[in-house]
Image: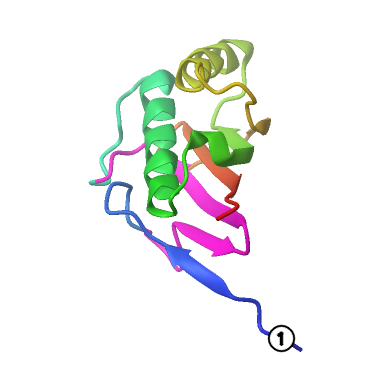
């Protein structure tokens, strides 16, 4: 049985893992990005608002994509966890998210769920397809 070739992807421009996981793992043409919280690369919470934390999550994901030679265009799926799933929070999240993806013609598929999160109001995981 052949071993699956996996490559660890790490960015200094995203928070370093705080547990036994990788920021990203590339397997074949796919890049799987671990959940990125609403924190800055230095680990500080990006702000009190869901919009600020959403932008931080997306910047972190973009930094990890960049390390793998990819961009937001390569994203195919995102799972978005909100600590408080209300219409108001989903609306605030969608505004920040939409602004980030405004120039992306085909947006990634997505699910948004309510989750118990430890320190931030949002966490996003992502999958990208990189045909290089």
Image quarter in which the N terminus is found: bottom right
Magenta extent: 17-41
Image quadrant of residue 9?
bottom left
Quick one: 39 or 58, which is closer to the camera? 58
Q: Position of residue 104 (x, y in %)?
A: 55, 23
Residue at 32% over, 50% down: 15
Residue at the extreme left: 42
Residue at 33% over, 54% down: 11
Image quarter in which the C terminus is found: bottom right
Q: Does 108 appear above or below 33?
A: above
Q: Does 97 appear above or below 127?
A: above
For label 1, the SS is: loop
Q: Where is residue 126 in the image (x, y as percent from the top left)?
A: 57, 44
Q: Can residue 116 be seen in this view?
A: no
Q: Where is residue 107 in the image (x, y as percent from the top left)?
A: 63, 26
Residue at the extreme front: 132
Residue at the extreme right: 1
Circle 1 crowding by C-alpha within 10 Å: few under 14, some 14–19, many from 20:
few
Image quadrant of residue 60?
top left
Quick one: 99 or 132, which is closer to the camera? 132
Residue at 71% over, 86% down: 2
Q: In this view, does 107 lie to the left or right of 98?
A: right
Which residue, given by chain and number where applicable, does mark 1 sit on?
Answer: 2
Q: In this view, does 114 lie to the left or right of 45?
A: right
Does 31 appear in magenta?
A: yes
Residue at the extreme bottom: 1
Q: Is residue 60 visible?
A: yes
């Amino acid at each position: 049985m052949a071993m699956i070739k996996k490559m660890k992807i790490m960015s200094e421009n995203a928070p370093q893992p705080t547990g036994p996981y990788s920021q990203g793992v590339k397997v074949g043409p796919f890049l799987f990005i671990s959940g990125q919280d609403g924190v800055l690369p230095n680990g500080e919470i990006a702000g009190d608002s869901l919009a600020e934390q959403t932008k931080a999550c997306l910047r972190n994901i973009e930094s990890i994509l960049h390390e793998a030679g990819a961009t937001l265009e390569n994203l195919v799926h995102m799972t978005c966890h909100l600590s408080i799933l209300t219409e108001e929070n989903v609306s605030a999240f969608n505004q920040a998210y939409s602004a980030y993806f405004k120039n992306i013609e085909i947006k990634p598929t997505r699910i948004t769920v309510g989750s118990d999160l430890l320190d931030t109001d949002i966490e996003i995981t992502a999958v990208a397809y990189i045909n290089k």
